[in-house]
Amino acid sequence: DAVVFWMRMQDMRIRDNRAFGQASEYARQHGLPLIALFILSPQDYVAHDRSARRIDFTLRNLTHVKESLAELNIPLRVITHSPRNTLPERVVEILSEWNAARLFANIEHEVDELRRDIRVFLTKDGRGYTVYSPFLRSWLPHLTDNSDPLACAPRVESNDPTVRQHPIFGKFFNAAGPESVEGFELSGEDAKMMRLCWPAGEDAAHEILRRFLQTKARTSQFGAADPLALGASEPKAGLKDSRIGKYKDARDRVDADTTSRLSAYLSAGVISARECIRATLALSNHKQPKIDASRDTGIGRWVQELAWRDFYTHVLALFPRVSMGRPFQETFAKVSWETNEAHLQAWKDGRTGVPIVDAGMRQANKMGWMHNRLRMITAMYLVKDLMIDWRLGEKYFMETLIDGDLASNNGGWQWSASTGVDPVPYFRIFNPYTQSKKADPSGDYIRYFVPELGKVFGDEIHNPSPRLAEKLGYPTPLVKHDEARQRAIRRYKNPGDV
Ligand code: FAD
């Protein structure tokens, strides 16, 4: 007999992992070996536009998970399965091969939790939240008061060492995990960059959290020796000077380095949002630890961002149609889009002629990640300036980002396209040049990612003259912003008009 814990792609940690803790507890109580199972399902990755970077990150985290499990005498079996529609039968087959009558997985638990959360989070008239602020008001007491207090993470006990001699399970300890998944291989250069920017494993994630909470924020990251690297040792700082301390005022500065950069780890479940919030409690001045989610402090603003993540997951769970290419606001389903392959490609390549947009897209292409402000600027530019269907941008982000997350990505795109829950109104269109001055006042960020403009200083970095652009081999803008803005407002006002 055995107990099986089925780890999934959003769930790649040992600490603070509820299903794993419960599986361990059950195995201990009944004196049974605990076996961990991970199934790679390439067809699902294709269907969900998963990026090769995200798959590579999964495999790298798997190596760490395997090591941590081995220390607890728990073997990990990794299998690759296709076609995806027979995956449930394959799991049942495995359970019977292993003579295992108990299967634990967070998805089962999450379905229950989802049902419970839906009850907790339903508004008085029985509908789900479609506006963020009331959701936040309901989310906070749920975190503090509900019967699973934040501080309770199930303990994982060391498993029986004799499992190492077991004729089937013992072999799992030595089996090497796959290094890549067919169709999702990375080039050598890209693999190197991903390892530099995003070290794998729970310890790395906790170190990045510590860096955000306790080390000194840099005013301009792009003078540093290796601005993209995470994990380099940095000077310690008290709350006021730390990254989280500066988060309230400087979080929209893309040339600084004040955000946590934890999104890849949160999306893959290498660290839990609960642990992040718990860590902020330790920083708070309150005698009784109390979650700070106010708009007035760095801690509070950051906690609010974590709530956005849950808000979008809530929206996706309640309105699954949003992830199936439907706008949440159906009236905008008829907005007319431009079909312009050249413009779409220029946007993807970071060659639109608008420096802040190009810098953002080149950052995404290079490191698989972009600052939130840049995601908004580049998304808004594709949708409102180029008038290209937001779904094409949504797909490109999923294929490129290491933190690609169905709910947050869809939420971000529908926000920018003004089609989502609680979105930016369609007539409030970002002027990319004004945004550029606010987000990158020093111009350091643009100069770093758009080397053609590396020697341009002053205001021209945000909007180089055609003469200068031509001299430097930099493209001139694809569209005139003011005209494009008028076109977008007209088409949104009268969906169907061209
Ligand atoms: P921090 O500022 O340190 O925030 C902490 C955490 O809070 C983030 O790691 C993330 O988990 C969460 N968070 C922050 N802002 C948001 C937000 N607006 N919506 C949802 N969660 C948020 N985030 C993803 O994780 N995956 C995506 O695929 C994704 N796609 C996006 C697409 C668009 C068009 C937009 C506008 C936003 C998208 N976001 C996505 C949200 C946000 O941009 C990133 O989470 C953030 O930039 C990650 O950087 P960070 O970890 O340093 O964030």
Image (cartoon, helix red, strand yellow):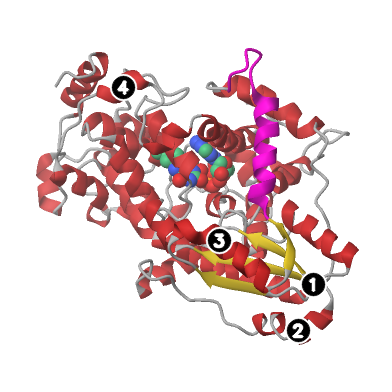
At label 4, counting other C-alpha atoms closer than 10 Å, the crowd grade (few under 14, some 14-19, many 20 or more) is many
Q: Amino acid at mark 2?
A: His
Q: Nearer the viewer, mark 1 or mark 3?
A: 3
| Residue at the spot 47% in from the left edge and 22% down from the top edge | 422
Q: Secondary structure at mark 1?
A: loop
Disc 1 residue type (three-letter): Pro
Q: Which comes before the other along the chain, label 1 or label 3?
A: 1
Task: Return the x and y of residue 48 as percentages of the image width and height.
Answer: 41, 51
Residue 456 position, x and y percent, is: 25, 48
The tag on residue 89 is: 3
Return the residue nearer the eye: 261 or 51.
51
Q: Which disc, if any, is residue 282? A: none
Q: What is the CA distance from the residue labelled 4 to the residue labelled 1?
A: 54 Å
Q: Is residue 349 magenta?
A: no
Using the numbered discs, state the Cα–Cα distance from disc 2 to disc 3 in whole angstroms.
Answer: 25 Å
Q: Position of residue 141 (x, y in %)?
A: 75, 27
Mark 3 is on which residue type? Glu
Name which residue lies at 64% across and 41% down.
111
In the picture of the structure, the residue carrying the numbered disc 1 is: 33
Q: Position of residue 45 (x, y in %)?
A: 42, 57
- Quick one: SS at disc 3? helix
CA distance separating discs 3 and 4: 41 Å
